[in-house]
Amino acid sequence: MTKATVSEYAAMTQQTGFGLGTAEEPFLANYDIDYTSGEAHGAVLNAKTRFVRVFVDSAAKVKIGAAATAANSSGGGESMAANQTEYFGVSAQDGSTWRVSAITRS
């Protein structure tokens, strides 16, 4: 099974003297997207979500946006390697249609 684990956050924090920002717990939502059989997407993001943490257990293309659909084509999403974790910033959402989509990278 190929899965993307998604965690949604409202804010990032940074302690004085340290250059590393980290996601502020608790997360707003946490779920898996199973893209074993092709493109799959999660639920619409929480209206308070401003950062998304995505972990993929296999090579994937991940796309985030309004009614996003990941694809193996130009503009089809960000390429991620197996076992990679990435944080993405999410701007104010238009009409609450933003979601995370993933597909196996070919």
Image: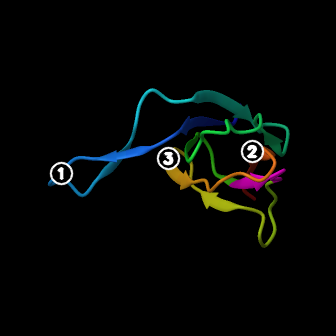
> Relative to residue 17, is residue 47 depicted above or below?
above
State the predominant SS element of the stretch in magenta.
Answer: strand
Real-space CA distance between mark 2 and mark 1, rounded to the nearest whole angstrom: 33 Å
Residue 75 image offset from top left, x and y in percent:
77, 70
Q: Which mark is residue 85?
A: 3
> Which residue in the protein does label 2 denote?
99
Residue 99 image offset from top left, x and y in percent:
74, 44
Give the residues drawn in magenta, as a range.
Answer: 62-69
- The magenta stretch spans residue 64: yes
Nearer the viewer's eye, disc 1 or disc 3?
1
> Which residue in the protein does label 1 denote?
16
Q: Which secondary structure lies at badge 1? A: loop
Q: Quadrant of the N terminus?
A: top right
Measuring 60% from the left and 28% from the top, which residue is drawn there?
29
Nearer the viewer's eye, disc 2 or disc 1?
1
| First along the sequence among labels 1 and 3 | 1
**Crowd tier of the residue under label 1, counting other residues whose Cα lies within 10 Å: few below 14, some 14–19, many 20 or above:** few
